[in-house]
Image (spheres, rainbow, N blue to C red):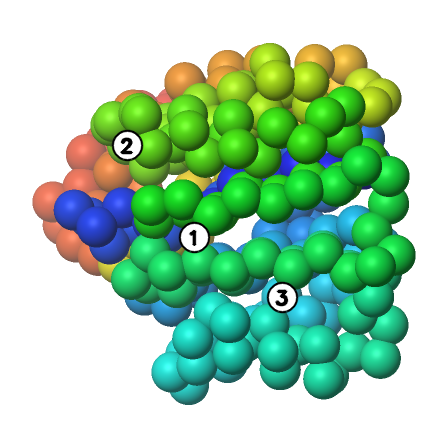
Amino acid sequence: MTFSVAGFCPDTGMLGCAITSSSICVTSRCAFVGSGTGVALTQNVTNPDLGPLGLKLLSEGLSPEQVLEALGEADSDVRWRQLGVLNNKGEGATFSGEKALGLHATAVGQNCIAMGNLLQNEQVPAAMVKAFENSTGHLAERLLRALEAGLAAGGEMGPVHSAGILMCAEPQWPVVDLRVDWHIDPINELRMVWHNYQPQMQAYITRAQDPDNAESYGVPGDE
């Protein structure tokens, strides 16, 4: 019911993921990102506890493959899960349990991973990886392009209803956390939200790190 992509930008150190699903509020359950640590994706019949655990294991120095092995040992129902891990070096690994739903597939590329279940075809993750690898610019834009490529390649068997981008940079909090939780065209709506947020993103970081030099809020009463 979900397809997703995670990516790393070696030029900026940014880490993030984009995800979409026929289910509501997919990002809240399936996407986990840690600043300077990595990305953990947990989907299919989802166990959200595996996301924070995956980031914790990455922070302890385990490789993505070792993290997946440890997650399998921690979850007695791992055969139902589809998992992806990407570290802060751009190294990734994926796993699909034997109970993964419908047609499912994964792909690992340069500084990125992609995966999905209940897909129209097995080429969807590879299309996302190709789009990410062949794109340039802001990491969030590259992730969004990859998600759009997955949809164009066939996407899920049914319509998607929710989508999101979650991304970390130097701050410990997510610098991009954009979500469309129930919409007839969530990926296109997510692009609209990103288009409006992108020009403001740095201002919010500056307000946190250096409020004396932050630009005006531009709202009534701000003098």
Q: Secondary structure at mark 2?
A: loop
Check disc 2 and report the residue beneath it. Answer: 138
The residue that appears at 77% across and 14% down in the rendered structure is 184
Whichever of labels 2 and 1 marks the residue nearer the N terminus, that label is 2
The residue that appears at 53% across and 44% down in the rendered structure is 107
Q: What distance separates the C-alpha of mark 3 from that of mark 1?
A: 15 Å
Q: Is residue 84 left or right of residue 61?
A: right
Q: Which mark is residue 107?
A: none
Instruction: List x then y, in percent, for residue 208.
Output: 28, 54
Nearest to the observer: residue 115 or residue 206: 115
The residue that appears at 51% across and 60% down in the rendered structure is 93
Q: Which mark is residue 51?
A: 3
Whichever of labels 3 and 1 marks the residue nearer the N terminus, that label is 3
199 lies above or below 18: above
Instruction: List x then y, in percent, for residue 58.
Output: 45, 75
The amino acid type of the residue labelled 1 equals Pro
Q: Is residue 144 visible?
A: no
27 lies above or below 39: above
The amino acid type of the residue labelled 2 equals His
Nearest to the observer: residue 37 or residue 115: 115
Check disc 1 and report the residue beneath it. Answer: 174
